[in-house]
Amino acid sequence: MAGTRVLRTRAVRIDAADKAAGRALYTDDLRFPGMLYAALLQSPHAHARIRRIDASRARAMPGVVDVITAAEAPATPFGVSPARYDETIFPADRVRYVGDEVAAVAAEDEETALRALGAIEVDYEVLPAVLDAFEALRPGAPQVHEKYPNNVTAEVHDEFGDVAAAEAQAEVKVAGRLCNRMPDGAFLEPQACIAQYDARGFLTLWSSTQAPHYVQRTLSMVLGVPIGKVRVVKPAVGGGFGPKAACGTHELATCLLAMRTGRPVKLRFTREQVFLHSRARHQFFHEMEIGARRDGTLLYLKHKNVMDGGAYSSFGIATVYYAGSLLGAPYRLPNMRYDGWRVATNKPACGAQRGHGGVIARALFEVLLDDLARKLGRDPIDLRLQNVMGAGERTCNHLDMSSLGMRECLEAVRDVSGWKDRESRRAQGRGFGAACGFFVSGAGYPIYRSETWHCNVIVKLPEVGGSVLVWTGAADIGQGSDTAMAMIAAEVLGVELDEVKVVSGDTDLALDLGAYSSRTTLMTGHATKMAAEDARRQVTEAVAARLGVPPERLEWRDGRLFDREGRADLAALRQTYLKEHRGFGDPPAGEGLTFREASRIAFLERGAIVGRGHYRPPPLGGTHKGAAVGTSPAYGCSAQVAEVSVDRETGQVTVHRIVGAHDCGLAINVTSVEGQMQGSMSMGLGETLFEEVKFDERGRVWNANLGEYKIPTALDAPKMECVIVESREPNGPFGAKEVGEGGIMPTMPAILNAIRDAVGVRPDEVPVTPERLKRLLDAAEGGGAAPCVGEAWPEVPGGGRTGPSFCGR
Amino acid sequence: MADERRVIRLQVNGRERVVAVVPHRTLLQVLREDLGLTGTKEGCSVGECGTCTVLLDGRPVNACLVLAVTAVGHAIETIEGLGDTRHPHPIQQAFAAAGAVQCGFCTPGMVLTAKALLDANPAPTEADVRRAISGNLCRCTGYEKIVQAILDAAAARGRG
Amino acid sequence: MLLPPFDVVEPESLAAALEALADPGVRSRPVAGGTDVLPDLKREYDRRLRFPALPAFRPGPFPERLVSLLRVSELRGVRVDTGGTTCGPLTTMSELAADDRLAGALGALADGAASVGSPQVRNRATLGGNLCNARPCADTAPAVVALEGVLTLTSRGGRREVAARAFFVGPGQTVLAPGELLTEVRFPPQPAGCGSAAMKLGVRRAYEIAIVSAAAWVALEGERVRAARVAFGSAAPIPLGVEAADLVGKVPDEAALRAAARAAAAQTRPIDDFRASAAYRRQAAEVLAFRVLERAVARARGAA
């Protein structure tokens, strides 16, 4: 493909000026006349039966306009995957975690709504709660849901290739475990929503969401409003990272209150409520064994995974698959066995969070690769380079690497980080660690079974001529998708970026599945490109018709329309334009027809020029159960090298530098690609060293605040250097594919490998807080346990092929 | 009395604004709800995130922890007071140019903190910058481009 | 989150402030920077509104009136004279951290102040608030104890002086009587050859509540230690001050400092909690004690 004009630049984001000026409007910045304020009553118990709710006192309070409980709310189950709809707006029978919503109040002001909560009498019968995934699997454990025996909400048992045969051939094996604690999305803008219901039964919800369409569907399905009368609008959103990608009770209850009161209703979360809602990353317990030949060729992976998913399924059925399937690449791994169990507990529900299921799994795999390198006396990067896949290869679990710049990424980080000179740095107490990762560029299938086009984009050229309107349901949540789509439209139409206006995140405009699984650049990008090309073709045809020449005679050069033969009377068209703009002070000039003239003439010729674009991936993947999960039209990949030092006396880890390389196919916006890489590194660092949600023995969150749930500050963030690799993905628009999530995969293992390089111990649980690392260092010094320490994980009872625990000790 | 409103005069962005507030109202509430200045954000309510940062007599503070009545007689600067649509403040321009703005929720607080830093220390080191913004959390950027933007703004200022 | 309803008065003199606090008919409490008091009130109010069945963070009735001290100019300022260094309780953490007069001998105070929360919090949080709220993790408390600060407590009935180590009674509790305000924190004159330092240990580098913290003050006479004190935060119910008696008369080399640190840390009584285990706190206390002693010695010698 020839060079690009707008793409691959560092264009300033189209919303940056407004955001830097404080003019961008987030949901809580909006207010409407007559607006009521809502508050949610949430369970103080991790597990309890609701014997009785009496809201009469609350209803009678001055200023309270409405109160709803399960009695007033539809009982239609919802969730993320139709196969696991296990939530209701308010549970009729029992609450399943501290924070489970029980009622909602709408009042004239927020304080009155909050005060009314105390006037709602709820008679709970406290039940025994289960707060640990392995406890939940034991016979006799409290059952979180009747319909999930043994609290297993989903399980996966897959084998690709022939693991037993591969085991027999393996000449060297490494094994280990890794677990994390539940993190939180910790986006800076808490959830908020405003609902409005008009006299004709049209429902509108403004919400801080990543997925307006999924919210729209759920509102319609649960509330019984015809879907064509439900509109969801996404204002500016202050970060999502996954937890905001599904509809929640807060949105449903707010809508119901608006429908019942006939007034707009606003609800916003406190920071504590963000933690209680969670829908963030699961807790994972991974065990793996990798077998290889002595020459370093990987032969097989055996992988067992138990996930604590909290009280509801959310995205969990996809998560448990991703945790296994996302190890099929980027190395040649011909044989893979995966057994995964997603377990329910009486804790906040876990869902999808950046890297969806693959992060802890990738971390353990990469750490074991280093173990393998050590055993074989090989350089860890060389070992990886020996095994990386290339474009055109297919994984053992049927994922096609249509492009894969993994080699280039690894070589880049090796060269930029000074990897080959790390011996001298180690003498100064520095450790180096490398790791790779990859991720889907959009899920191959929507979360509900459907033939739907995943993205639809309208490119409308205003009748008055000139600018370009891009209408999309895509959700810019800070990743810069509005700018990316504007750049694609500008590139296709040959106009300046300044002339493109994007209206997005509104289900009235177009259907888009939303911002999750890193899909927007590739999928919405395709649809935008198609719509822009459609619009341009219509303009060309219309102008050609006006000129009386075949459309092939006309060509666009630098955003202007010319006749290849130079004979057509473009001047006459200009005259038409000028006559229509008497009094205007900025007449078009120069050779050819400017875009605004051409688009105006096209309108005069045939009416409004509306370009349509849409995209859905082709059928992807194998035929095994769950094959859909992990499929994608393309895969981004990433490599990182982290440089750390450890304070051996306190166990504190300092990450000095992370060098990352990411293959995004083609960088639509270079600065945005780097921004996603750096944001991923920062989030990965936080989960590796600082972040954990802490529960007490009654299932209450102890640290539901940003003081004790610790995301990196500017003093914790290292120097982050980015190299962009462009493999020109054939399935991506202009060759582009994802960068939003692939970049987090290598961070945790790069840091873990670097810690091991620095001080010789390898933690098997994250976050590696100073205390945890100090304990390991003391144990190692005392000649104690080998790197893989910790209590033995219990067997997984009654679940498929478990086999003996194979952690090397 | 707790429920009685009192009329106070606040100096906001160089202009006097008159509001009637109950004593326990915070400056953040006054800015966002009474004065319609929604550029200052509420991320946590307890001074742990920095999205509510405003400048009080030129110093960054968390507006969520300032009782509005105690702000009388002090100069309050919010993000709305910096630049305007046609002439953004150089720091705002630097943030946009450097790619330091992603979701934008931390941005108003960051920009104001940066302004206070550069007003007090026109030639900060990177370490100075990181320390100055250590009270402004960002989940999107990893801070790298924010630090760069502030250093760029300082350099531009230095070049006059 | 919302604040519970309360009245606010803003006296402009100490006398007026004491008057407001002494009013028996109104439940009052003083507030300065508000960076401890206001979050506590918000969290507690939110807890009682949303989760009345869960335990209160801070049981008891809310104050009816906050007496803001911010306009009492008498309580501001740091002055150095023959009596020593006297800090007004309204001195903010930022002011303490930036005050060059607090380098060297009184460096522990500047260190502690500089480590509080965030720049925004430091611009409002005051020395008085930090000490009077008396959290075990208060960042300036170990320094004030190690430096043997003398606290002046004033009421309408008069003044009294209390040594820092006697000021703290328990978590959140001091010897302040109802109607009494902290009006001065004075540090004795520091002859040449004195140095102090403070450090805290957290998980990340800003916005941290200390897992454990330490401060040390050392006075040298020639090559040897004339006197030395160590104090810990988050290692006992109150800031814990320890005389490093075994250092007296010794040359403060690494071995001597390590031994002194070990002895000092052995006296800590840390607890297990969600932030850390007691065992780790004790280990870390010893590490921090050594490091602050080392830095205090360097400052006493005129370096760093």
Image (cartoon, grey):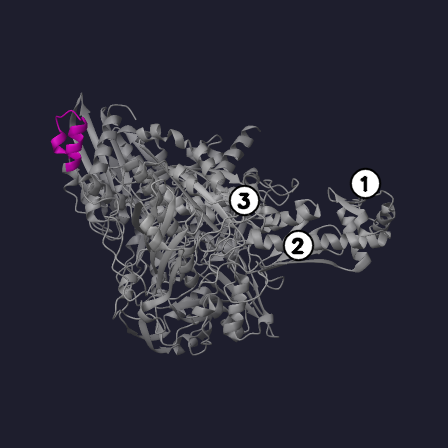
Disc 2: CA contacts within 10 A as few (<14), some (14-19) or many (>=20): many
Q: Earlier in the sequence, mark 2 or mark 1?
A: 2
Disc 1: CA contacts within 10 A as few (<14), some (14-19) or many (>=20): few
Secondary structure of the residue carrying tag 3 is helix
Q: Which residue is mark 1?
A: A591
| Image mark for residue A672 | 3
Q: Position of residue A35 (x, y in %)?
A: 53, 66
Q: Which residue is mark 2?
A: A530
Q: Are marks 1 and 3 in contact (CB under 8 Å)?
A: no
Give the tally of numbered discs: 3
Question: Which kind of residue does numbered mark 2 sit on?
Answer: Met
What residue span does the magenta drawing correspond to? Answer: C244-262
Q: Position of residue A263 (x, y in %)?
A: 54, 71
Front residue of A469/B39: it is A469
Magenta span contains residue C247:
yes
User: Mark 2 and mark 3: span between their CA atoms?
Assistant: 22 Å
Identify the subunit bearing mark 1: A
Question: Which kind of residue does numbered mark 1 sit on?
Answer: Glu
